[in-house]
Amino acid sequence: MPRSLLAATLMVIIAVASPQIVVAQHDARKVLWFNGMPDIPPTFTTRHRKKMSNYVNGYRDGTAFDVTYTHRTSGGGLAAALSAAQYDIVVLDMTNRDALINAKDQEALRQFYGTGRSALMLDGSFAIRSIDINPTTKFPGVNKSGGGLLMNQMYALSENGGGILIGTDHDIWQSNANKALQAILPQAQFQGTTNPSTDGDFIGNVLLASRVIVTARDLLKHWESVPNQGEAPVGTFADFTGQTVTLFSLVETADKPGGGRKRPYISASFSPGRERIPIDSADKVFENMPTHSTKP
């Protein structure tokens, strides 16, 4: 046998026999990004929302998440989107005063949740993540902090088995977000309008370092420039099956000037831990964590 052919044959045998050199390939997580927001030029448009979904889709050259973006502003659109394919994560971009979520949509959400993709993240600051009001509000934000926050949210849901992110704004825009949420947790709801002060904290590393290092102060600059986020629910609730679900605050702060009740902006159905990072901290508090990246 010629030496070249013998060498090639040996390489094949070694590759088959040596599991150490076989690299497991993990498929990108399938994401449905459902935009239920009407176009309100020039601030809120499909272009602004799609910029966020494209950011997730292109992260790590598209190897982490495979995003399907859908824009619908009428009832039944979410049910149709969920029936079209199988997803690991559903992002509900819900800032709309008009009726959008109907009974079919709620049932589709219950079916998705019932598959075991039951992690929840509820974000009352989501609407302003990508809007054209001033330089700090343009996605991906101050020092790409808005993009980093979004990726940390996506990875947190992924690492908790998949689930649903519901994002909205202050009270007059919350009706459809609450209809979607109440399909899963009938007694939970977004509420109110916030005005962030420096009297608050991020809790744990979920938002600041699940995968991308984000500085708390950069996010606060964004929120302060549009001081009307929604308050996310926290506490213990029963889901539609009767199972107990606890929603934990991930970031909370009192309204200006501070000193009052700390109001949660983002909550989740998994514990973030106990460490508290001041909401105006300029430190990259988790920078030494080897599994995380500072580059979104």
Image (cartoon, grey):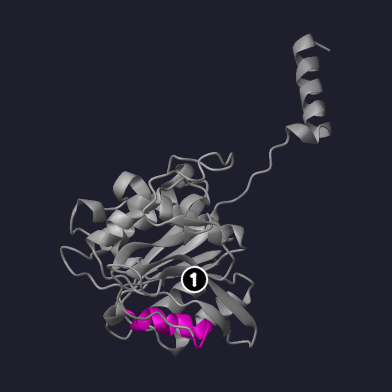
Q: Position of residue 53 (x, y in %)?
A: 38, 57
Location of residue 129 with respect to 185 vertically, above or below: above
Looking at the image, residue 115 sits to the left or right of residue 73; the answer is right
Q: Quadrant of residue 278?
A: bottom left
Name the residue nearer the viewer: 150 or 93: 150
User: At x 46% / y 86%, what residue is drawn?
Assistant: 104
Looking at the image, residue 135 sits to the left or right of residue 233; the answer is left
Name the residue nearer the viewer: 11 or 126: 126
Classify the position of the C terminus by image quarter. top left
User: At x 32% / y 68%, what residue is drawn?
Assistant: 258
Looking at the image, residue 183 sits to the left or right of residue 116; the answer is left
Q: Quadrant of residue 191?
A: bottom left
Q: Which residue is mark 1?
A: 84
User: At x 47% / y 85%, what residue is drawn?
Assistant: 182
- Magenta span: 174-187
**In the displayed image of the protein, which residue is found farthest to the left?**
42
Q: Position of residue 175 (x, y in %)?
A: 34, 84
Q: Does the magenta portion include 183? A: yes
Q: Position of residue 3 (x, y in %)?
A: 79, 10
Q: Position of residue 273 (x, y in %)?
A: 59, 60
User: Dominant secondary structure of the magenta stretch?
Assistant: helix
**In the displayed image of the protein, which residue is found farthest to the top?**
3
In this rendering, does residue 66 appear at all?
Answer: no
In this rendering, does residue 250 appear at all?
Answer: yes
> Identity of the amino acid at label 1?
Ala
Location of residue 23 with respect to 273 vertically, above or below: above
